[in-house]
Image: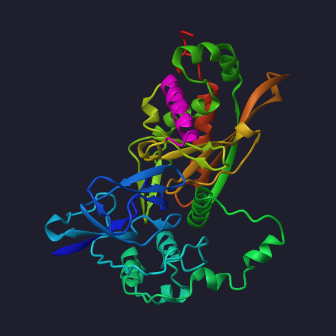
Amino acid sequence: MKKRVPILMPQMGQSVAEGTIVAWKKKVGEAVQADEVLMEIETDKTNVEVECSATGQLVTCLKQAGDRAAAGEIIGHIEVEAADEPAATPHAAAPAGDAVTVSSNTQFRINHELPEINRDRYSPYVMRLAMLNGVTLGELQGIRGTGRDRRVTKSDLLQYLARRPVGASTVQAELHNGAPAAEDLSALGKVVAMTSIRRTIADHMVQSIHTSAHVTMVHLVDVTHFVELRDRIKGEFEQRFGAKLTYTGLMIFVTSRVLRDFPSINASVAGASLILRKDISIGCAVALPDESLVVPVVQHADRKSFPEIAQELDRLIACARARDLTRVDVEGGTFTISNFGAFGSIIGTPIINQPQVAILGMGAVVKQPVVLDGQIVIRDRLYLSFSFDHRVIDGAMGGRFLNAIQKVTETLDEKTLNLETL
């Protein structure tokens, strides 16, 4: 007796809600072996090869190369002998109690904007899943919710999708009825399709704005001492440790130490709960040549010395630009730093990397006249922009956090940075 095992889009990192299929490594009808590479998936963070979860025959591919799917969504099936059926799919697990079946001719549609709708009844994840599957606003409102206060849960939506008729109009069609056709757009200028990574980043940023109540605070930090130290020892530092002495590395070092005293900032949101993360792992936004970006993570940054952070940061940046990051390199981030100052910007308002609750932006280091002890002197100064989720962090905590970073940064010495021998 044969049974069908669903192939699910894997969850590739806590903040990654979906992925794009780059290529299937097997064709429908071909035999597959457990643990052999079945397909390649692309996210806004990295490319990942996904192994087969069972031995059998690939019988359906519901998503093709270039299509996107939400984490946990069924994208194909493997037919296996009943005795060989795995107890669980290792790459992603369907929600408990969900008996989901999808016809091979179901027309999935990819949409990019979340509608304005009752957020008390629909979570951002449910809304996103509805958009990805072309569920209309009317359909969504007609689903009977089994959650608290009749809230529609992921399980409710997946069960609806399992028996949903094919061919309904999409939410995007309802929201954008009368949008200009491609030929009309070409009259305005050259039409260039967004890359898969850029589309994913765009969706992630829009989702973040819809999810969090963003507030940004700015502090001006005096980094004159570090600039002088860097100018004096950067050559010897690179020769000894094989890594560059950077402002980003400095801020990862400082922030990871300060976060120990601010557990509500080193946190993530899960529904109505706040998870105070036991590890402190700092993500760092890295711009790529194709104008996209990735966010590799310095794992356990608070346990690393400054030279160790510099070495790991150099490795991650090199891997990111070579598109050689692994899943481990992009998973587990609890806080993010974005250095837009590398491009000359002085102040910015970064967007939170969900499901984290805050992000720190670094402007360019600039020389400014400052009154110090009654004298006008030139100092090297850096604007830090701290964006946080006001649902979790209030202004007082945000101010204390920035004050702590400022004080630690301005009082750093060679001994604290493990550089006294240089």
Q: How many marks?
A: 0
Indicate whether residue 309 is drawn in magenta.
yes
Quadrant of res 270: bottom left
Q: Nearer the viewer, residue 9 or 93?
A: 9
Q: On screen, 359 above or below 116?
A: above
Q: On screen, 112 above or below 281?
A: below
Magenta stretch: give its range: 306-324
Indicate whether residue 120 is drawn in magenta.
no
Q: On screen, 124 above or below 231?
A: below
Quadrant for the C terminus in the image: top right
Question: Residue 155's spot in the image, x, y percent?
Answer: 36, 76
Q: Is residue 15 visible?
A: no
Quadrant for the N terminus in the image: bottom left
Q: Is residue 326 visible?
A: yes
Question: Residue 176's spot in the image, x, y percent?
Answer: 68, 81
Tell me the residue at 42%/80% (across/down).
152
